[in-house]
């Protein structure tokens, strides 16, 4: 039970780190809920218009027009400035696939020779030399 719960916790932490979700974001969810209630009462915004104004296409217009210099917008969660670049490059060279390469010769040289060096133990019943099948 302990192993499975630990693996679930570790998997979730890796997932949340990949989504750029920090512990400080969880602490700022109260600020997000409070600011959402203010927008609903003042402007009649629903969640999607609120999200668009603070995290979407209308973000710059909303910051410039209505809340000049407001520190409340800086406290909202998920406002991290992260620059990640993941690039995968695949180069396919068709000439290499068409070439007929000669197979590499394999030389096998036996490197083990069995020598019976246990003849002095024939007089004892405890020690027995390896038996040939």
Image (cartoon, rainbow, N blue to C red):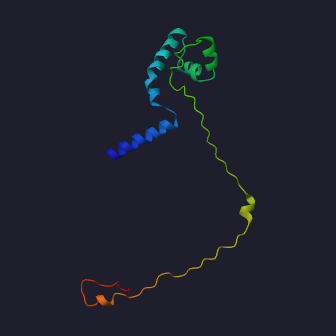
Q: Quadrant of the N terminus?
A: top left
Quadrant in the picture for residue 82: top right
Q: Position of residue 41 (x, y in %)?
A: 50, 10
**Residue found farthest to the left:** 125
Q: Is residue 78 above or below residue 89?
A: above
Q: Position of residue 72 (x, y in %)?
A: 51, 16
Position of 7 compared to 122: left or right? right
- Compare residues 48 and 109 and report the one nearer the observer: 109
Residue shown at the point (36%, 42%) measured from the top left: 5
- Compare residues 111 and 21 and report the one nearer the observer: 111
- Compare residues 5 and 47 and report the one nearer the observer: 5
Quadrant in the picture for residue 95: bottom right
Position of 103 compared to 46: left or right? right
Q: Is residue 113 above or below residue 41?
A: below
Quadrant in the picture for residue 63: top right
- Picture mark count: 0
């Amino acid at each position: 039970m302990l192993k499975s719960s630990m693996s679930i916790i570790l998997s979730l932490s890796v997932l949340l780190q990949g989504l750029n979700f920090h512990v400080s974001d969880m602490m700022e969810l109260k600020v997000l809920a409070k600011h959402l209630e203010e927008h609903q009462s003042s402007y009649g915004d629903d969640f999607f218009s609120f999200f668009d104004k603070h995290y979407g296409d209308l973000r710059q217009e909303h910051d410039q027009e209505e809340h000049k210099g407001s520190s409340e917008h800086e406290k909202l969660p998920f406002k991290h400035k992260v620059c990640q670049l993941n690039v995968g490059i695949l180069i396919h060279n068709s000439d290499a696939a068409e070439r007929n390469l000669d197979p590499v010769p394999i030389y096998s040289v036996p490197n083990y020779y069995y020598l019976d060096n246990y003849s002095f133990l024939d007089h004892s019943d405890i020690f027995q030399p390896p038996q040939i099948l």
